[in-house]
Amino acid sequence: MCFQPNYFQKKPYKFPTEKSHNRSFQPKWITNDFAWLACSASEDHVYCKPCWLFFHEGVGKGGHQNPGKLVSVGFRDWKKAKESFKKHMEKEYHKLCVLQATSFLKISAGKQLDIASQLDSQRTKEIAENRAAIEPIIRTILFCAEQELPL
């Protein structure tokens, strides 16, 4: 699955270089530091996988953060790549999207219940706890009624 770390094409690919500076995308960026990157060889741009899939308008602190190039149009400033990737990792919307991607993977693998099931199981647990708490009160009231004692 595309969310898995180090997921990229298995066949060797020579990434295009900038004509003036001889810079290009470095596959080691994905394998070493930024497993969330996805490279589009046809566009010669990189994207953030979780943000590209899970980003919604109005997220981040105060809902004011706009998506960066890694989310919207693709990134290709290879000179400033690592610095830009590190800044992107600090964005609130990136952290939220990574969390959503992680939850998606856990739910898909059956390691975590989906939200509706989590809420339902929490509600069922709460009902059982409430019934256990009220049972001694009901027994006390019934005992008082049988003995004709005032409450």
Image (cartoon, rainbow, N blue to C red):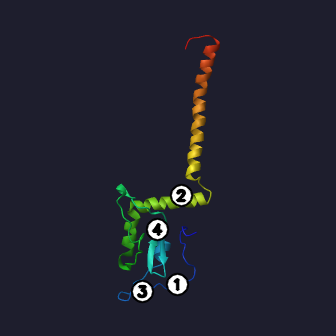
Marks 3 and 2 in Cβ contact (< 8 Å): no
How far from the left and from the top, in percent, is residue 147? 63, 11
Residue depicted at x 36% and y 86% = 21
The residue carrying mark 3 is: 17
Label 4, label 1: how far apart the Cα atoms are: 23 Å
Instruction: Indicate which label's residue lies in the foreground, 4 or 1.
Output: 4
Find the distance from the CA under tag 3 to the CA under tag 2: 36 Å
Mark found first going from the N terminus, 3 or 4: 3
Label 2 secondary element = helix
Q: Is residue 30 left or right of residue 139?
A: left
The structure residue drawn at horizontal position 38% and vertical position 89%, both measured from the top left corner, is: 19
Q: Are marks 4 and 1 in contact (CB under 8 Å)?
A: no
Give the spatial CA distance, label 3 vs label 4: 24 Å
Q: Earlier in the sequence, mark 3 or mark 2?
A: 3
**For the point 62% across and 14% down, which residue is it?**
145
Pointer 1 and pointer 2: residues touching (CB < 8 Å)?
no
Placement of 129 over or under 29, stated as above or below: above
- Measure how far apart labels 3 and 1 are at the Cα level: 12 Å
Circle 1 or circle 2, nearest the eye: 2
Residue 103 badge = 2
Direction front: furthest residue:
57
Q: Nearer the viewer, residue 149 or 90?
A: 149
Task: Decide: few, some or many residues near mark 2? Use Cα within 10 Å; few <14, some 14-19, many ≥20.
Answer: some
**Which element type, helix, strand or loop, lies under badge 4?**
helix
Q: Which residue does the numbered mark 1 point to in the structure image?
A: 13
Local SS, label 1 = loop
Amino acid type of the residue tagged 4 in the rendering: Trp
N-term mark: 1 or 2 = 1
Q: Name the mark on residue 52.
A: 4
Disc nearer the start of the sequence (4/2): 4
